[in-house]
């Protein structure tokens, strides 16, 4: 039985259309999930929607819709985006579903049984945009002289009866846990920030609201709705079928954006410790997709790029490639039309696309659409092959350390080497003078393309699949266990088409 691997994205707020920030997280998590599947793990990949809370309630009211009508429509849009981007999630979880209500109420009871819930009165600041409580000392004053959350989100004064979670009791336990599990929070900057925050002291957390009712009722606490972050975090348990089924717990990896690290690295482990459940193995906070002027792309700021029109313009695989390759994972990335065009044309259309096109064309012509027999390898063939055979070690290390950008840099270094090899061997000249040598060069290039195709599947699944189709590789020979099983000479190769068109002009917005 292969090892289980449970990976998640954050669940998106149902307060507007999906934008490029959501798409980025889905793409990156998908690449990591596909990598683990190809490595032979039994993967569960969950994503979904965060549908409760004051923000969604208010926005639905403003639109003249019931919250349920609004979230139903948006859940379809996010699922459509996933399909368009070839996101291979196994579960799509929505917090308004009955299975989630059940899990949340079950977890609530575990916290209560552990003595961590008590009744009191909340008076303090609340940022609806982030669904987060703030103390006076945490607020900043903006240029207009208004108090805001540190992110700039507006805050309002809230006074209401509330149940609290004894978060303060977990300060030392969390610090001990971070200490003994250095990989729990990544990248290192996020880890340092969280440790600093927890060292500064933890206040008990208000975990019910009474001023609206769009949420999950706290069991036995009339009029109290469970705080949307407690509700939302539990999605990671609901998605595996908890409490009936806990085989995929603990999660191996929660991929989240850096703005919500505190919820995942402080509140979530504290809730789990209180409930007596294991903690996720790793939380990775990625950076933001920024606009060309350096702003975070966000629905509330109204500066978003629509992933549907971007993909329609440049292709979904091309978009996946750009976002995964361009920015070191964990850092912010600036998106611009120029940069996407440059990447797609130079790496995909020129380097990889042309290499495949030239090699496939020549093989079809010279060898009647079959893979040539390898024959004897010359020194330069062996050198390229060795490089290709060494690649998986560094590639795996890059992916295991959640650096898809590095993994792609390694792959494209090999694409570059293969192009140099192909150009220097001039196989087009060998047809008449030395057909055996031509066969060897084309075979070797096809073999390297096969390896590249297998390793590219996590990032550009559709194009990589087509490349493997063109080599005649059957579906059962495409996982990493087959990397070392060489291409079979004499295998017939179907018709092919260019892998990537050149991008001429971007007018995606
Ligand atoms: N609903 C919460 C998460 C609950 S998880 C238990 C939330 N939703 S969100 O819709 O605002 O964001 C969903 C994810 O997308 C988060 O991880 C967030 O950081 C990420 N992004 C939202 N805008 C982003 C960018 N501009 N760039 C990259 N990712 C960003 O937070």
Image: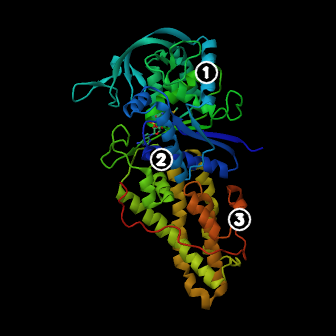
Q: Residue at x 43, y 17 (%)?
A: 211
Taking the image as drawn, is residue 385 in sight?
A: no
- Name the residue tied to disc 2: 23
Furthest-left residue in this view: 144
Up-down relation of residue 181 to residue 77 (above or below): above
- Label 3 CB sits under 8 Å from any ligand 1 atom: no
Between discs 2 and 1, the one toward the N terminus: 2
Q: Secondary structure at mark 1?
A: helix
Furthest-bottom residue in this view: 432
Say which mark, if any, is on residue 474.
3
Q: Residue 172 or 49: which is nearer the viewer?
A: 49
Q: Residue 219: which quarter of the image?
A: top right
Up-down relation of residue 175 to residue 222 (above or below): below
Residue 313 coordinates in the image, percent (x, y):
42, 60
Q: CA distance from mark 2 to mark 1?
A: 31 Å
Q: Secondary structure at mark 3?
A: loop
Say which mark, if any, is on residue 105.
1
Between discs 2 and 3, the one toward the N terminus: 2
Q: CA distance from mark 3 to mark 1?
A: 47 Å
């Amino acid at each position: 039985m292969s090892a289980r691997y449970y990976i998640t994205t954050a669940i998106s707020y149902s307060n507007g259309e999906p934008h490029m920030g959501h798409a980025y997280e889905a793409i990156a998590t998908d690449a990591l999930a596909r990598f683990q599947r190809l490595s032979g793990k039994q993967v569960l990949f969950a994503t979904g929607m965060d549908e409760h809370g004051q923000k969604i309630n208010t926005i639905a009211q403003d639109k003249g819709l019931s919250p349920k009508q609004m979230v139903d429509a948006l859940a379809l849009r996010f699922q459509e985006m996933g399909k368009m981007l070839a996101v291979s999630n196994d579960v799509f979880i929505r917090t308004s579903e009955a299975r989630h209500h059940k899990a949340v109420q079950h977890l609530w009871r575990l916290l209560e049984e552990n003595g961590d819930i008590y009744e009191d009165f909340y008076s303090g600041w609340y940022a609806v945009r982030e669904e987060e409580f703030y103390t006076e000392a945490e607020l900043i004053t903006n240029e207009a002289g208004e108090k805001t959350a540190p992110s700039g989100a507006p805050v309002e004064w809230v006074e209401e009866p509330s149940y609290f979670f004894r978060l303060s009791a977990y300060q030392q336990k969390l610090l001990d846990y971070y200490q003994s599990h250095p990989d729990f929070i990544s990248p290192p900057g996020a880890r340092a920030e969280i440790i600093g925050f927890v060292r500064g002291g933890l206040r008990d957390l208000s975990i019910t609201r009474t001023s609206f009712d769009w949420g999950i009722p706290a069991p036995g606490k009339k009029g109290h709705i469970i705080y949307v972050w407690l509700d939302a975090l539990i999605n990671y348990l609901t998605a595996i079928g908890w409490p009936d089924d806990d085989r995929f717990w603990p999660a191996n990896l929660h991929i989240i954006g850096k703005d919500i690290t505190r919820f995942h690295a402080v509140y979530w482990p504290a809730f789990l410790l209180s409930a007596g459940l294991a903690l996720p193995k790793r939380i990775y906070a990625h950076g933001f997709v920024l606009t060309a002027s350096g702003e975070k792309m966000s629905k509330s700021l109204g500066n978003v790029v629509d992933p549907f029109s971007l993909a329609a313009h440049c292709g979904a695989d091309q978009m996946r490639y750009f976002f995964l390759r361009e920015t070191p994972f964990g850092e912010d990335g600036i998106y611009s039309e120029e940069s996407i065009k440059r990447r797609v044309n130079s790496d995909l259309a020129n380097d990889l696309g042309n290499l495949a096109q030239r090699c496939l064309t020549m093989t079809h012509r010279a060898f009647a659409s079959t893979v040539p027999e390898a024959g004897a390898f010359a020194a330069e063939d062996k050198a390229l092959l060795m490089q290709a055979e060494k690649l998986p070690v560094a590639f795996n290390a890059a992916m295991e350390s959640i650096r898809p950008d590095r993994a792609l840099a390694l792959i494209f270094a090999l694409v570059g080497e293969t192009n140099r090899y192909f150009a220097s061997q001039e196989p087009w000249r060998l047809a008449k003078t030395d057909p055996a040598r031509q066969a060897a060069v084309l075979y070797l290039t096809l073999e390297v393309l096969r390896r590249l195709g297998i390793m590219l599947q996590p990032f550009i699944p559709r194009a990589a699949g087509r490349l493997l189709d063109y080599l005649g590789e059957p579906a059962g020979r495409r996982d990493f266990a087959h990397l070392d099983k060489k291409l079979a000479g004499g295998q017939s190769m179907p018709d092919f088409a260019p892998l990537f068109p050149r991008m001429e002009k971007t007018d995606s917005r």
